[in-house]
Amino acid sequence: MSERSDEHEPPTPPEQENDPVKDLPGAVELLTMGMTVAIIIAVGVVLGIWADHAWGTAPWGLLIGIALGTVAAVVSVVKQVRRFL
């Protein structure tokens, strides 16, 4: 009676395995989305501050830069989310 009991157990399907790497693509997409928003808004702020210094229009350049950066970030996020719908 040297049979092992695990020889008669059915193999576990791949869906039931606890693989932390399979959830990684979703996390990477969320990280990419967050970084995209931060970078786009930061570019808008920097360009707005530059416009204020170049043309002496403070604070309007900054406000317009924030607004345009926010709009661009929303458009970018919508494009990224539509891939999953």
Image (cartoon, rainbow, N blue to C red):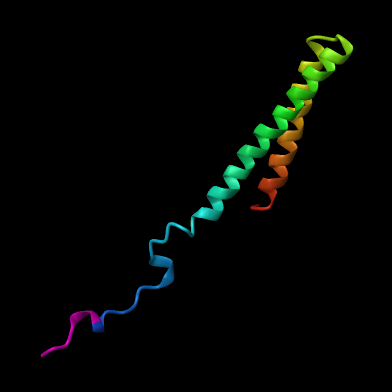
Toward the bottom, the furthest residue is 1
In the figure, residue 59 lies in which quadrant?
A: top right
Toward the left, the furthest residue is 1
Quarter holding the N terminus?
Answer: bottom left
Whether residue 64 is visible to the viewer of this picture, yes or no, is no
Which residue appears at 80% of the width and 9% of the height? 58
Toward the right, the furthest residue is 55
Is 29 drawn above or below residue 74 in the view shown?
below
Is 67 drawn above or below residue 8 in the view shown?
above
Whether residue 24 is visible to the viewer of this picture, yes or no, is yes
Q: 49 or 85, which is in the foreground? A: 49
State left or right for residue 54 relative to residue 19: right
Which residue appears at 65% of the width and 32% of the height? 38
Q: Residue 22, image x and y in percent?
A: 49, 60
Which residue appears at 62% of the width and 44% of the height? 32
The part of the chain drawn in magenta is 1-6
Q: Residue 13, image x and y in percent?
A: 40, 73
**Number of marks in the rendered image:** 0
Asked if the stretch drawn in magenta spans residue 10, the answer is no
Which residue appears at 26% of the width and 79% of the height? 9
Q: Residue 7, image x and y in percent?
A: 25, 83
Is 46 drawn above or below residue 1 in the view shown?
above
Asked if the stretch drawn in magenta spans residue 5, the answer is yes
Q: 71 or 85, which is in the foreground? A: 71
Q: Residue 30, image x and y in percent?
A: 58, 44
In the figure, residue 62 lies in which quadrant?
A: top right
Q: Main secondary structure of the magenta part?
A: loop
